[in-house]
Amino acid sequence: MFNKDHFIQDCIKAVAEGQGAVLEVVAEAVSDSARVMSELGEPEHAGLSTLYRSPDLTIINFAWAPCMSLMPHNHQMFSVVGLYCGREDNVFWRRTETSIEAAGAKSLGVGDVTTLGRKIIHSVLNPIGKMTCAMHVYGGDFFEPREPRSEWDHETLIERPWDIDRVKSLFREAEARFGATRKPLN
């Protein structure tokens, strides 16, 4: 049975053992997706909610707006992603001499878990017309990584420094776009 405080403590213990141990903790948590939703609450807005942050571990609850896409980016640390609501499509990218190119993809549904190595570049899409919720656990400080992070422009695939404020803005814009398409319930 999922409990937020126990989950955080389990992740703190697991991160010292490595990505595989964190994977087990996240897989156990999202195996009871209804309990996770009950404990964390239905998302009211798209965005990221930090559940825990330290130099060695960050736990974020992501709520992806319907049909939202996030540009290619890297983390410079390992991560484990577990979905408890909706669908998340990841495109994996590899560096070329001048840019990046698509190198694979993975689609996650409720209860699915995946790991990303510290050098992985990926983009994320919520391909469905409702919110998608996922627990993301990082082996470091997501907001102030030890190594600089990058993001790539969706259209040009030109690399630039990662900007958390730009990312937060993208979540707000995606939510606003979705809200504008909904009809009032009269």
Image: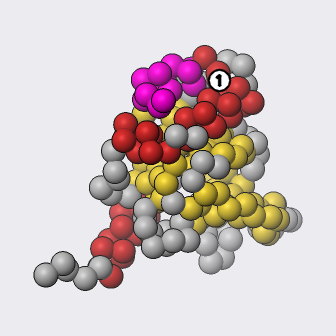
- Image quarter (top left, top right, bottom left or bottom right) of the C terminus: bottom left
Residue at 49% over, 54% down: 85
Q: In the figure, residue 47 lies in which quadrant? A: bottom left
- Vertical placement of 50 versus 165: above or below? above
**x%, y% of residue 37?**
41, 45
Camera-nearest residue between 64 and 39: 39
Circle 1 SS class: helix
Q: In x, y percent, where is residue 90?
A: 67, 61
Question: Most prominent secondary structure in the magenta stretch?
Answer: helix
Q: Residue at x 71, y 43 (%)?
A: 115
Task: Residue 11: say if magenta.
Answer: yes
Residue 72 in sight from this viewpoint: no
The residue that mark 1 highlights is 15
Which stretch appears magenta?
1-12
- Pick whichever, 148 or 186, lies toward us: 186
Q: Residue furthest left?
A: 186
The location of residue 41, given as percent across then percent down, is 33, 44
Q: Amino acid at mark 1?
A: Val
Is residue 103 among the parts visible in the rendering? yes
Is residue 46 toward the left or the right of residue 74 in the image?
Answer: left
Is 100 on the left-hand or right-hand side of 184?
A: right
Instruction: Name the image quarter holding residue 178.
Output: bottom left
